[in-house]
């Protein structure tokens, strides 16, 4: 971490990054030096975009949009990732923790319903003090933690007083798929335990709160249906139903977009095509049959690449600063 003048850098934060075990990969590397772990992130926060975002679930995006902060790097390596340029390519710019706090406040000033931390897991030590500092200034909108679900309980405990709305994925029940498609060993049980921990926090804070259609506190578990793997999608829903019933919201997504030029997909030919509408309908029917009441789904066909936001460093720099690094 090179911005030693940043007053939000605490000894606690530095000691966490010096032996990083934030996620289930438990790399144990010193990210403050020139080592990195599976996520490839250093200890200095790097982001690719901070802007209003309108394509989340209605209780997250509302009319005004969600204040999305897209963090660079990721703890998973999904071969079909839509945001590969930032998640695996590491596109983005380094910013100070003070600047990150300012960004939250700028998004709030733009009318965002919440601050939506997208792919934040590798920066949790840094996120906690930035939210605290922004709250002390004037941040009053909810913090949304938008993650892959591949989280350690110990890390989620650090976020107890920081996060208001949890937006985790539950991608697979089949661990072989999780390993092959996302390089995430043990994903099924790890993510299920993480969702249980998130839900426990929500319930300890008084449970789900939705005000004027916007979620202020709660948990929405997301699942992206993958072409050719609809059976696992149904298992995902059954597992969630058996574990949590209607204590969680569930969002079933159809927006799978086959990436272009991805040789890794040659071993997974079903992922070379978009999801068929009938298969998506079958998964939705299964969710309905199970009895989910707070269920979100997507209309129309698979979302095209045009719906992926442009990662152009929008909102990353203070207005008076020039872009210095990408
Ligand atoms: S956050 Fe990155 S360095 Fe830390 S344990 Fe996870 S993958 Fe490894």
Image (cartoon, rainbow, N blue to C red):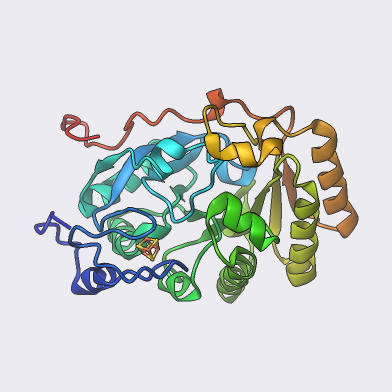
Q: Picture quarter containing residue 32?
A: bottom left
Residue found at x 24% / y 36%:
317
Above or below for 57 versus 241: above
Q: Residue furthest front?
A: 267
Using the image, determine if residue 98 lies above or below residue 207.
above
Q: Residue at x 56, y 31 (%)?
A: 259
Question: In which quarter of the view is residue 203 placed?
Answer: bottom right
Of the 4 image quadrants, the one containing the C terminus is top left
Pick whichever, 324 or 320, lies toward us. Answer: 324
Q: Is residue 146 visible?
A: yes
Report whether 202 appears left or right of 253.
left
The answer to whether residue 170 is seen in the rendering is: no
| Image position, residue 188 (x, y; %) | 64, 65
Residue furthest top in the image? 306
Residue 94 is situated, as x and y percent measured from the top left of the image, at 23, 45
Q: Considering depth in this image, is 325 or 108 the residue closer to the camera?
A: 325
């Amino acid at each position: 971490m090179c911005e030693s003048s940043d007053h939000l850098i605490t000894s606690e934060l530095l000691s966490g990054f010096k032996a990083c075990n934030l996620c289930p990969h438990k790399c144990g590397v010193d990210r403050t030096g020139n080592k990195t772990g599976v996520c490839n992130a250093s200890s200095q926060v790097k982001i690719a975009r901070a802007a209003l975002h309108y394509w989340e679930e209605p209780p997250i995006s509302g009319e005004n949009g969600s204040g999305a902060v897209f963090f660079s790097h990721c703890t998973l390596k999904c071969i079909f990732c839509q945001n590969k340029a930032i998640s695996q390519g590491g596109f983005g710019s380094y910013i100070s923790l003070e600047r990150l706090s300012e960004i939250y406040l700028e998004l709030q000033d733009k009318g965002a319903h919440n601050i939506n931390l997208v792919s934040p897991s590798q920066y949790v030590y840094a996120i906690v003090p930035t939210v605290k500092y922004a709250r002390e200034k004037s941040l009053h909108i909810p913090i949304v933690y938008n993650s892959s679900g591949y989280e350690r309980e110990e890390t989620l405990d650090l976020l107890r007083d920081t996060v208001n709305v949890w937006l985790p994925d539950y991608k697979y029940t089949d661990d072989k798929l999780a390993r092959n498609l996302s390089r995430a060993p043990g994903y099924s049980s790890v993510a299920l335990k993480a969702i249980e921990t998130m839900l426990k926090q929500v319930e300890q804070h008084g449970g789900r709160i939705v005000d004027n259609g916007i979620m202020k506190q709660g948990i929405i578990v997301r699942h992206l249906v993958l072409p050719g793997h609809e059976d696992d999608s149904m298992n995902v829903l059954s597992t969630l139903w058996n574990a949590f019933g209607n204590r969680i919201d569930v969002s079933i997504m159809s927006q799978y977009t086959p990436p272009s030029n991805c040789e890794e997909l040659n071993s997974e030919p079903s992922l070379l095509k978009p999801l068929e509408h009938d298969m998506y309908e079958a998964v939705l029917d299964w969710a309905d049959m199970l009895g989910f009441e707070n269920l979100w789904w997507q209309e129309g066909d698979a979302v095209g690449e045009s719906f992926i936001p442009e990662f152009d460093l929008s909102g990353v720099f203070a207005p008076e600063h020039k872009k210095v690094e990408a």
